[in-house]
Image (tube, helix red, strand yellow):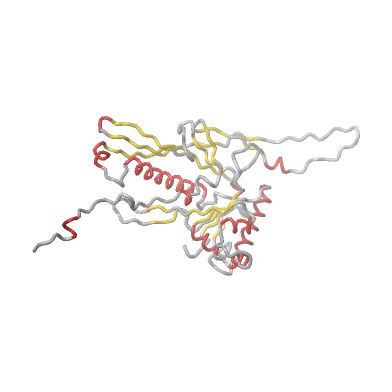
Amino acid sequence: MPNPTPGSVHVNGLLTDISVAFIQSSTKFVAPKVFPMVGVQKQSDVYATYSRADFFRDEVERRAAGSAYRRLGYRTDNTANYRCEEFGAEHPIDDQLRANADAPYNPERDAVQFLTQKMLIRMERDWTAKFFSTGNIWTGSSDGADKVGGTDFTRFSNAASSPIEVVQTDMREVEEKTGFLPNKLVIGRQVWYDLRNHPDVVDRYKHTSADSITTAMVARLFELDEILVSGAVHNTAAEGVAHVGAHIASDNMLLVYSAPSPSLMLPSGGYTFMWNGLVRGANNGVAIETYREDQVSSDIIRVKGAWDHKVVTADIGIFYTDASTNA
């Protein structure tokens, strides 16, 4: 006698409490965290700089009774400038798509997360190109050039290397040039793994803590305020081709002084100028907008931002390339 089979009494449907999407956490991205963000009203402007040489020169003299005091002065420069460029993208949601969508799909939510992820990747890659690339962008080293692993220092993947000594020696070099000790170290994922597992670091904590070694712990060893790990990944392949993932930051490292906040009379390795006059209500420089296109019966979700990642004081930082052989 015929009986129903399990397959004949069930029609597969979408689960409403689980879905799979690859959305990287914002904690993996360092672009909004390394340097202060400066909100500006105009796309471009200039900012003032003071002569370091004039401020650091020892010119105060002994004064004899009845004689005049020596008068001192300093120079200023109003030629340094920024220029914010706008970035953005859109995603349409057709009325038919919205009306026909089953849970767990939510076209508006999905579009916002999709576009936000795209903008985070764009900002991180732009930050990396401006601050985290070769070409002597940073000139704080003794010869003003990038430091190359295997040539200027032993790569940190080598247990015989001395990362604490390397970094603190270079901190002193920057201080001699600028009067400021670097306070931040920005590293790629593999360099972080090399550091946290390095014998010099493990040795300092093996008798004092059973916890996993954190960036805060290593920062204290280096006498830095913060170590930031760029773990963001992007797809280097074109649309329609198999995904090829790569870390945006690679195996490089930046040692730099970053001002605690946008300030007068204080240097900073860099600033990120955000054009708030164009993008109001932005979160970390990014805003989400929605508008209607009636001619195609669609709502358009737009992400936009306008910024300029700007090196402000080149010799207050040192850039290291090829810091690991494991990347």
Nearest the eye: 6 or 242? 6
Is 277 above or below relative to 322? above
Nearest the eye: 92 or 134? 92
> Quarter of the image holding residue 56?
top right
- Residue 286 shown left or right of residue 80 in the figure: left
Q: How many numbered marks appear?
A: 0
Question: Residue 316, position in %: x, y?
Answer: 61, 48
Question: Residue 163, position in %: x, y?
Answer: 60, 62
Question: Residue 160, position in %: x, y?
Answer: 58, 69
Question: Residue 286, position in %: x, y?
Answer: 45, 39
Is 191 above or below relative to 37? below
Residue sitting farthest toward the front: 1
Is 179 above or below relative to 189? above
- Residue 167 shown left or right of residue 5 in the figure: right
* Quadrant (top left/top right/bottom left/bottom right) for the N terminus: bottom left
- Residue 68 shown left or right of residue 319 in the figure: right
x 35%, y 42%: residue: 111
- Residue 80 shown left or right of residue 111 in the figure: right
x 34%, y 56%: residue: 243
Residue sitting farthest toward the right: 65
x 64%, y 58%: residue: 168
Residue sitting farthest toward the bottom: 160
Q: Is there any visible trace of residue 136 in the rendered image?
A: yes
Q: Is there any visible trace of residue 195 in the rendered image?
A: no
> Quarter of the image holding residue 156?
bottom right
Nearest the eye: 160 or 19? 19
Residue sitting farthest toward the left: 1
